[in-house]
Amino acid sequence: MSDVRHVLVLPDRDSAEAVAEELPDRFRVGQEPQIVRDALAGEDDAEDAQWLVVVEDPAERLDSAALDAFAAEYEGWLETP
């Protein structure tokens, strides 16, 4: 098994929390997704932050295109490695 990790980038905390809440049911992930605040370089203002939802996928069974489409529903995207 490898350490496959998907990172969904969302525009705000509410979107990230909604994605993290819906993701386990929608994609049948075993582990709880992590929510991480990612301040943009050089910015201190909370408004200038992106929120990341990190999903561990050790079995490599999640479809990247489906995750990207899911994030797009919340005005986000799947970060490509």
Image: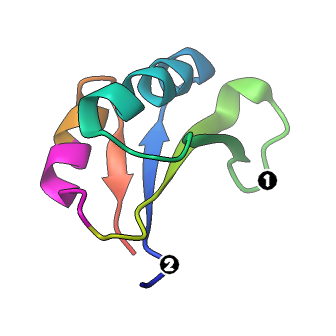
Figure quadrant of residue 23 = top left
**Is residue 47 positioned above or below 7 on the image?**
above
Which percent across, then down, holds residue 40? 68, 49
Amino acid type, callout 2: Asp
Which percent across, then down, holds residue 19? 43, 26
Residue found at x 85% / y 38%: 44
Pointer 2 with pointer 1, Cβ within 8 A = no
Residue in front for this viewpoint, 6 or 2 = 2
Residue found at x 42% / y 70%: 58
**Is residue 33 positioned above or below 42 on the image?**
above
| Quarter of the image that includes the C terminus | bottom left
Which percent across, then down, holds residue 43? 78, 44
Query: Residue 67 in magenta?
Result: yes
Which percent across, then down, holds residue 33? 54, 42
| Residues at marks 2 and 1, CA–CA distance in whole angstroms | 30 Å
Q: Outermost residue, bottom direction?
A: 1
Residue in front for this viewpoint, 63 or 72 = 63
Residue in front for this viewpoint, 33 or 9 = 33
In this figure, which colouring scheme has been used for the structure? rainbow
Report which residue position mark 1 lands on. Answer: 42
Find residue 3 and name its label. Answer: 2
In the rendered view, does 55 fall on the left or right side of 25? Answer: right
Q: Which range of residues does the magenta coloring cover? A: 61-68
